[in-house]
Structure formats: C-alpha cells, structure tokens
C-alpha cells in the first residue's frame, strides 16, 4: 500500500508474503500521524491494484480563502482537477486558475460544468443557499467555515445533506495539522493526566485594506465567526464537547457593527475548563498561524497560542513543548518540572484536507469534520455572542 498527499494506491498480491508485521505497523503509524494521508481507513484488497482518481472540482468564491484552495488544487493534480471557478466580483486577471472555466454566477457553473465536487469559499451569508444547490444536484462539497451564519440555517443544511446523501466536509483545516494530531495522541495516551484547563489566544491586527469588503464590517463577518470559530473547533477537537459558555465581546477598537474583540470561558463535558481571547485589532505574536507557519500570509514567530494543562503535565501548541515532572510521579508545586521540545510534524493542512476530501468521495472515508460537526462548533461559537448579549451563561444548541 502506498499513500502520498494526493493519491493512494493499494497493491497487495499476498499480504502475508509481501508485507511483514513491522512494515504494516510502520505504515499504520505513518498514516495515522498524518505524514501520508490522514485519517487512513482503507480496506486493503489482496487481489487488485486500485488508483484513486482525481476529483473534478470547482471553487465558488475567489477571495482570500478561495485563492488558497485554488492554489492547493493546482498543486495536487493527482488529488483534484480544477474545472471551474465562480466569483461575481473578483477579477480573474492575475489569478492562475489553470485551464478552469470562469463564471460570474455560481448556479450557472453548477448547471453547465456539472462538477463532481465543489469547494464553497463564498461570504458566510451564501453558504446555506449554495450548499442546498449542491444537495439538489448531488454534488459533494467542502464548505468553508462557518457552516452557515445561523443555527436555524445549520439545521436546514444538515437535513438537506441527510436527505441528499452527498458527502460533505467543513473547512476546519487545523484538525489536519501534524502538531494537532500529535497533541490528540498525547491526550489519548494519558500523558497529561486528567485535562484540567485549556487556553488559547488569537490576536493580530488586520490591515485597513482587509475591511474594504463590506461584509467583513457587518454582523457575521467579524473575528468571532471568521477566526475564533477555528479556535473553538480546536478546543472541541482536543477537549471534547462543550456544554456551557460565558462570553463577552466588544467593537470599541474599530467601531464597526461587528465585534473586533471577544473573550470566553468554556465548560466541557469532561470537567475541563477552557478560555479564549480573540481580537483582530491588536498586534501580538500569538496566533496558531504565526506559531506554526501554516499560513504564509502571517509572519512566523514560533510562539505558542495554545496551552493544555493536565494533572500530570502540560503541552504547548503549536511549538509542541511538553512540561512534566523532572522525577516521574512527583507532580507538585514544590517539585521541579522540565520543558521538553517535541519534533512537530510539518505539513500543509490544506493539502491534507484536499487529499482527505478525495478519499471521502472516492473511498467513502469517514469525514474528519462533517456538516453536523461543523454545526456543533457553530453552536458553541454563537453561544459566545449570545452570552455577551444576555450577560448570562449560555448552553449551546444541541445538534
């Protein structure tokens, strides 16, 4: 069996003779760690060689995130073929879309090109309608986050997906980061003991030009739904489901109708507490993009934005430094602790995500982030806003 970031081949004539136990264990480790294709849930055929065909894929929306997806597709021809792009505003001049057709209307693209799959990277308010279009046409889709703007819309989309049977992902791409997979394994192995507290900071100053797109100054276009939702999804991914939220938000720095700063406390089902501070109006070295280098638009700082604290140790992300007692079993404030840097697995999460999307469609691989899972992250995120308005603890809507 061979796996590379953009295609998977299975080649076994006689598993017992061709692959010994050590090689199988090595292969499983590489696949589960995300160095190859993650998660790997492939049925190994002992009779035939299977090559996973590239997806005929279109991108709706050619803004910042849409362009990132376009670049990823063009860099991975074995995973996907870019057949069309739709954007009513963006000028295709200077944007490399390969041989893809360009449309000003997304619905026209879907009807004329009939792609197998679509990446929806349009403004948040369009997500429900365009997701429904895909469901009606039997087109698989990867929806950028947030899955929708409101929870009622999310419920409508979840139902449409169930009825249509299309395969979906939500673009919480940080779940594919190697350091995140490593942290999940540390937690699963119990190396931190019982998880007590998780904290995250996402703080950067966006340039004025960023807000020339008017939707980014209106409700639904602020850092809570654009940026903090990623951090909340990461907290859910690492710590488990959230059953209560207390939040505050402010627009005092930019004066827009939408917030520029938010903070929250999360109560997890397992008893862990989490904190979040998020702003797009303050300069700092503390974002996961700066700490990991996963987004070249952010300057690299090598600083950790996440801290996971357990009864037996702690872990920083994305730098991946583990703190533990100098002497095993001596976990107390009057005993020395040491910080040990771990070797992070470096990979482009967008490439890993696209490869997973290919296998989701072709091989029926379970989704890393389904529309239902995306709706649950949205519910926890909107609970921050609701708590801020009511000045009371909020229970996220169940999905």
Image (tube, helix red, strand yellow):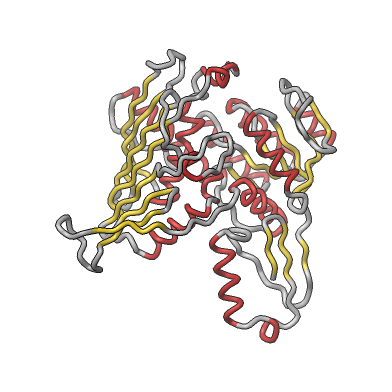
Give the percent coordinates (x, y) of residue 267: 31, 43
Residue sitting at 72 percent across and 73 percent down? 45
Is residue 236 or residue 160 the one in the foreground? 236
Location of residue 352 with respect to 61 vertically, above or below = below
Is residue 210 or residue 151 the one in the foreground? 210
Question: Splitting the image into 4 quarters, where does residue 283 fall?
Answer: top left
Give the percent coordinates (x, y) of residue 6: 71, 55
Give the percent coordinates (x, y) of residue 305: 40, 42
Location of residue 260 with respect to 46 vertically, above or below = above
Location of residue 302 with respect to 251 vertically, above or below = below
Residue sitting at 34 percent across and 63 percent down? 191
The furthest residue to the bottom: 17
Describe residue 307's horizontal placement relative to residue 169 as left or right: left
Question: Splitting the image into 4 quarters, where does residue 282 fall?
Answer: top left
Describe residue 136's horizontal placement relative to residue 383 as left or right: right
Figure quadrant of the N terminus: bottom right
Question: Splitting the image into 4 quarters, where does residue 384 fall?
Answer: top left
Give the percent coordinates (x, y) of residue 145: 56, 36
Describe residue 382's horizontal placement relative to residue 123 as left or right: left
Count how many numbered circles sit on residues in the image. Answer: 0
The furthest residue to the top: 255
Is residue 171 or residue 185 the one in the foreground? 185
Describe residue 43's horizontal placement relative to residue 113 as left or right: left
């Amino acid at each position: 069996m061979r796996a590379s970031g953009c295609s998977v081949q299975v080649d076994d004539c006689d598993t017992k003779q061709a692959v010994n136990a050590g090689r199988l264990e090595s292969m499983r480790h590489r696949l589960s760690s995300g160095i190859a294709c993650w998660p790997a849930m492939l049925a190994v055929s002992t009779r035939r060689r299977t090559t996973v065909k590239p997806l005929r894929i279109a991108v709706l929306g050619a803004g910042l995130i849409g362009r990132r997806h376009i670049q990823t597709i063009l860099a991975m021809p074995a995973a996907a073929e870019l057949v069309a792009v739709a954007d009513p505003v963006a000028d295709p001049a200077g944007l490399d879309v390969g041989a893809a057709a360009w449309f000003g209307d997304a619905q026209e693209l879907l009807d004329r090109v009939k792609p197998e799959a679509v990446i929806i990277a349009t403004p948040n308010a369009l997500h429900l309608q365009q997701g429904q279009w895909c469901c009606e046409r039997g087109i698989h889709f990867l929806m950028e986050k947030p899955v929708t703007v409101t929870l009622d819309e999310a419920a409508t989309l979840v139902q449409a997906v169930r009825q249509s049977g299309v395969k979906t992902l939500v673009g919480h791409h940080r779940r594919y980061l190697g350091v995140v997979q490593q942290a999940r394994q540390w937690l699963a192995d119990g190396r931190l003991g019982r998880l007590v507290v998780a904290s995250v900071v996402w703080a950067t100053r966006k340039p004025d030009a960023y807000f020339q797109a008017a939707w980014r100054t209106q409700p639904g276009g602020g850092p809570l739904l654009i940026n903090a939702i990623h951090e909340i999804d990461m907290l859910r991914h690492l710590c488990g489901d959230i059953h209560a939220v207390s939040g505050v938000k402010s627009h005092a720095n930019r004066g827009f109708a939408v917030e520029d700063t938010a903070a929250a406390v999360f109560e997890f089902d397992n008893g862990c507490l989490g904190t979040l501070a998020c702003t797009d109006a303050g300069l700092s070295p503390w974002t996961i993009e700066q700490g990991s280098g996963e987004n070249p638009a952010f300057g690299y700082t090598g600083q950790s934005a996440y801290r996971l604290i357990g009864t037996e140790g702690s872990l920083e992300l994305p730098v991946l430094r583990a703190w533990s007692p100098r002497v095993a079993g001596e976990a107390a404030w009057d005993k020395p602790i040491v910080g040990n840097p771990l070797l992070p697995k470096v990979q482009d999460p967008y490439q890993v995500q696209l490869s997973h999307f290919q296998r989701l469609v072709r091989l029926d691989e379970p989704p890393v982030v389904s529309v239902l899972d995306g709706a649950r992250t949205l519910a926890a995120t909107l609970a921050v806003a609701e708590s801020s308005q009511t000045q009371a603890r909020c229970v996220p809507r169940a999905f």
